[in-house]
Image: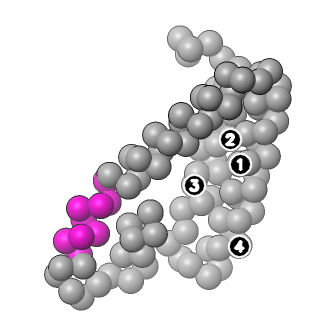
Amino acid sequence: MVIVNFTVLLVPQDAYASAISKLLEGKAAASFVMLVGIGLGLGASSSSPFSALTVTAKRALFLLILGLVNITIFDADILHYYAFYFFFAALLLSQSTRV
């Protein structure tokens, strides 16, 4: 994820570095999102819906604060985006699998 987001901030002049970044770009983001989804699903299945909602909301708040602090240093920060995805996922945790 660092390599993918590093090229957003600093576009490399080297064609080799740019090719490596393009190769990893889609796979890294998809892998990260899948791991987060699996982790949320496993965490929610082993606890009560209210507990899962509370824990996920706390994690989202932590990511939001960390992302907003980090964006002052690193313009290509994406943690605050993931915080909103976590908030959205927290709302869906109590819903049926059909939703």
Which residue is label 2 attached to? 87
Visible residue check, residue 10 = yes
Q: Is residue 30 left or right of residue 98?
A: left
In x, y percent, where is residue 96?
62, 12
Residue 19 is one of the magenta-drawn residues: yes
The answer to whether mark 2 and mark 1 are in CB contact below 8 A is yes
Name the amino acid type tagged 4: Val
Q: Secondary structure at mark 4?
A: helix
> Residue 17: which quarter of the image?
bottom left
Cα separation between marks 4 and 2: 18 Å
Q: Residue at x 19, y 71 (%)?
A: 19
Q: Residue at x 29, y 84 (%)?
A: 12
User: Counting other residues with Cα less than 10 Å from the Cα at mark 4, is it few (<14), some (14-19), or many (20 or more)?
Assistant: some
Cα separation between marks 2 and 3: 10 Å
- Among numbered discs 1 and 3, the one appearing first in the sequence: 1
Q: Residue at x 17, y 81 (%)?
A: 15
| Region in magenta | 18-26
Cα separation between marks 1 and 3: 10 Å
